[in-house]
Amino acid sequence: MPGTIELPTPEIDAEIESKKVRERDYTVIVWDDPVNLMPYVTHVFQQVFGWGREKAQRHMLEVHEEGRSVVVRDSFEKAEYYVHALQKYSLTATLEPAS
Amino acid sequence: MKPHAYDEEGTSWFLTPGERNLLLTLFSRPIDPRQRARLSRTSEALEEQCQSDLAGELENHRSEVRSRLVVLLGAASMATTTTQTPSGTREDSGWILRLTPEDRESFLQALNELRLGAWEQLGRPDPPEVPADLPLNSPNTLHWWNLEIASRFQGRLISEESLE
């Protein structure tokens, strides 16, 4: 139509939302599942976080008995890195906004 | 599968010909489809922003790990080991698989991927134990077998670590 200028859709809201998501702290949670073996989960915690066997076993048992264990609280980038690392071992891990 | 030698670069494992063939077969097959991993259970914003990156990264990683293991198994060297038994000396022919610590982690991840793939194909049973009344001709027999055999190899790799 003559005289009409089509403006691009603003993406500012999405950018602000993305920035908000990335600026807060996150917790990494490992969830219980019936299939991963307990020695395997302990091993993964030792490898991914560099923990000693005792600490790794403590968190593994927390996952097993409580259904979940918070293993990290950190920035978005670091928490995302740990979730990816845990999921490469097929553990059920997610990151959640820290309360 | 048993530890053969240790050095600063990793561990050498002795595999029987049957074990090597089995692992080559398992890691050469197409990967069982898996339910996608979630990045967050509470934040939809996170899921929307990051999920596609995660899914792609995981899929590539799984393929790379399997390919790496097939190469390693193909590069294993033939060997003979001697074992003392109550009835005398026994010689076994097989293969030596060298694993760096990084390779061992890949091996564990690939075995666990096999376990979880089989478990999902079985409908995610809880507990994941072979039913006592499983018919031999059941379509699930192969999945149960995969789950069990991958668990055994995984157990060997982890128990060796605890001896180091």
Image: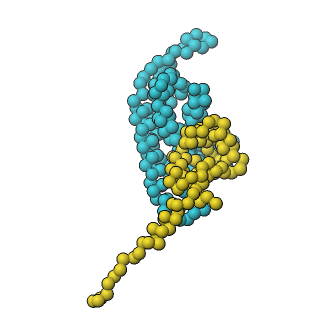
Chain colours: A yellow, B cyan
Q: From this viewpoint, which residue is outermost toward the top?
A: B88
x and y, in percent, of residue B63 in the image: 43, 45
Q: Looking at the image, can residue A20 be seen? A: yes
x and y, in percent, of residue B76 in the image: 42, 28
Q: From this viewpoint, which residue is outermost toward the bottom?
A: A2
Of the pair B125 and B158, the residue shown nearer to us? B158
x and y, in percent, of residue B40 in the image: 57, 58
* Residue drawn at (29%, 89%) of the image: A3
Indicate the quadrant where residue A36 lies. Answer: top right
* Residue drawn at (66%, 43%) of the image: A60
Q: How many marks?
A: 0
Q: From this viewpoint, which residue is outermost toward the right?
A: A65
Indicate the quadrant where residue B89 lies. Answer: top right
- Position of A22 relative to A3 (above/below): above
Of the pair B118 and B109, the residue shown nearer to us? B109
* Residue drawn at (46%, 31%) of the image: B100
Q: Is residue A82 rendered to the left or right of residue A71?
A: left
Q: Is residue A1 rendered to the left or right of residue A61?
A: left
- Position of B78 relative to B36 (above/below): above
x and y, in percent, of residue A48 in the image: 55, 42
* Residue drawn at (62%, 46%) of the image: A35
- Position of B128 relative to B99 (above/below): below
Identify the image quadrant of the C terminus of chain B.
Answer: top right
Of the pair B83 and B101, the residue shown nearer to us? B101
Q: Looking at the image, can residue B23 be seen? A: no
Of the pair B56 and B63, the residue shown nearer to us? B56
Q: Is residue B44 rendered to the left or right of residue B65?
A: right
